[in-house]
Image (cartoon, rainbow, N blue to C red):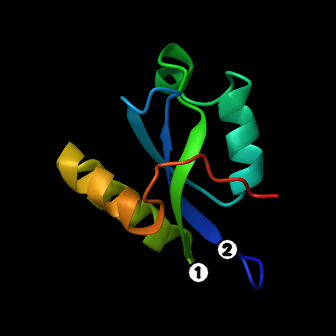
Amino acid sequence: MKQNETYYCYILSNKNRTVLYIGYTDNLERRLNEHSNGKGAVFTKKYSVSYLVYFEEFKTMKDAKLREKQLKNWHKDWKWNLIKETNSNIETISLN
């Protein structure tokens, strides 16, 4: 493992904010580009899910993966409430 490695658990949505996708990665910018170009998960391509609405940073891949699993088991309302805590208007987050 590299020093200072950062891992991310992230939530994407579609344009109309009707669908959520949760994933984890070690390179958020690259992964978002993959989703935007239809090279991410089959689900994100099928439902046009490529808008970043929430993310968390972790020091280990294990922690990011555990958080992903935890969030995937949450009720949809809980996920939306989590997003709204830091992104009240559910706007697309820009990494630039």
Task: Assess disc 2: are there few (<14), some (14-19) or many (≥20) residues with their C-alpha within 10 Å of its C-alpha.
Answer: some
Q: Position of residue 93 (x, y in %)?
A: 63, 53
Mark 1 or 2, nearer chain start = 2
Residue at 55% across / 76% down in the picture? 58
Residue at 53% across / 29% down in the picture? 49
Structural distance between the alpha carbons of marks 1 and 2:
5 Å
- In which quadrant of the rendered view does residue 40 lie? top right
Q: Is residue 74 visible?
A: no
Q: Residue furthest top?
A: 46
Q: Position of residue 56 (x, y in %)?
A: 52, 68
Q: Are marks 1 and 2 in contact (CB under 8 Å)?
A: yes
The amino acid sitting under disc 2 is Thr
Q: Quadrant of the C terminus?
A: bottom right
Residue at 42% across / 33% down in the picture? 17
Against 89, residue 62 (above or below) is below
Residue at 45% across / 73% down in the picture? 63
Would residue 51 be found to the left or right of residue 46 on screen?
right
Q: Which mark is residue 6?
A: 2
Task: Assess disc 1: are there few (<14), some (14-19) or many (≥20) residues with their C-alpha within 10 Å of its C-alpha.
Answer: some
Q: Position of residue 14 (x, y in %)?
A: 50, 29
Q: Which mark is residue 59?
A: 1
